[in-house]
Amino acid sequence: MEPLVVLLVVGSAFLHALWNAGLKRQADPEGAAIAILGIAAAVAGGAWLVAGGAALPGLAGVGWSLAAGLCEGGYFVTLALALRAAPLGIVYTVSRGGALALVWPASALWLGEPVGGPAVAGATVLGLGLVLVGAGRRDGATARGVLWAVACAGFVAGYHLLYKAALATGAAPAAVFAVALAVALPFNVARLGWGGLARAKASLGARPFVVGVAGVLCAASFLVFLSALARGGAGAAVTLRNTSVVFALLLAWLMGERPGRRQVAGAVAVVAGAVVLGWTP
């Protein structure tokens, strides 16, 4: 992987973990998610205009971007529900690690990216780590959070693959992301009904700086990542982006979360599996 791509992906990983931590700090994660999504959509649209507009060649690029938007919508819903019930460290590790476990076989079967013995070993270690993270807490609320995080992982894997397909048509990253969020935002509002807009407004009014910064960071993290994804394979890029698990665990610790030994061991296994996958030729 090119050094520039590595730098872009790791940078986007840090920004992504940071805005997820901001969402976790909200009293109403579902309402705040709509506010953050709205701000991110505005930033993405602005970036598209600054980039010169257009840059969506053909119907294929539009179609893949719209499909990615549906996955983005599901991602924001399930992420908010998971963070409402479970700690940031657990939710982030399960959702990001689970997505990686799904993206690698899909990218091999659909996009033709290679998967060898070391990749299988890495995926096995990663899967073990996810089991340890999910099994570490047994109260009902956290169990529900883990299940929502698993669902979130499916949406994360989906939008990564669909973004890659859209970018492969020659579409510009800012254009792809702006179109996707144009789908994701009304999807999230419709799920909560008109009350969702009031909840989003209340969340923004209660903590305007935190929610506003989280929205900008959300947009920045995706735009930077899509720029990297346009230059590299989906499996390798998603793998390297899972360095965000380390950032998320550190942020969770700073926020007062104290994971048990099983969560720590599981997180280490997830990162180790991601490293093996990432360095597999």
Image: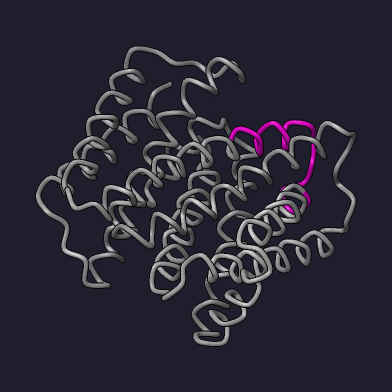
Which residue is depicted at the point 23% across and 35% down?
Answer: 131
User: Percent x, y for residue 203?
Assistant: 53, 79
User: Percent x, y for residue 225?
Assistant: 57, 49
User: Percent x, y for residue 90?
Assistant: 28, 51
Q: Quadrant of the C terminus?
A: top left
Q: Quadrant of residue 89?
A: bottom left
Q: Which residues are magenta?
A: 161-175
Looking at this rendering, what residue extends furthest in the left direction?
261
- Indicate the colouring scheme: one colour
Query: Seen in the image, is 209 located left or right of residue 89?
Result: right
Total number of numbered discs in the rendering = 0
In depth, the one of 99 and 222 nearer the eye is 99
Q: Quadrant of residue 276?
A: top left
In depth, the one of 111 and 279 nearer the eye is 111
Which residue is depicted at the point 27% across and 37% down?
Answer: 130
User: Percent x, y for residue 143?
Assistant: 27, 47
Q: Is residue 197 magenta?
A: no
Q: Is residue 34 above or below residue 120?
A: below
Q: Is residue 202 above or below residue 115?
A: below
Q: Quadrant of residue 132?
A: top left
In depth, the one of 235 and 89 nearer the eye is 89
Q: Magenta residues: mostly which secondary structure?
A: helix
Which residue is depicted at the point 41% across and 44% down?
Answer: 96
Q: Is residue 69 above or below residue 33?
A: above
Q: Is residue 166 magenta?
A: yes
Which residue is depicted at the point 34% across and 18% down?
Answer: 120
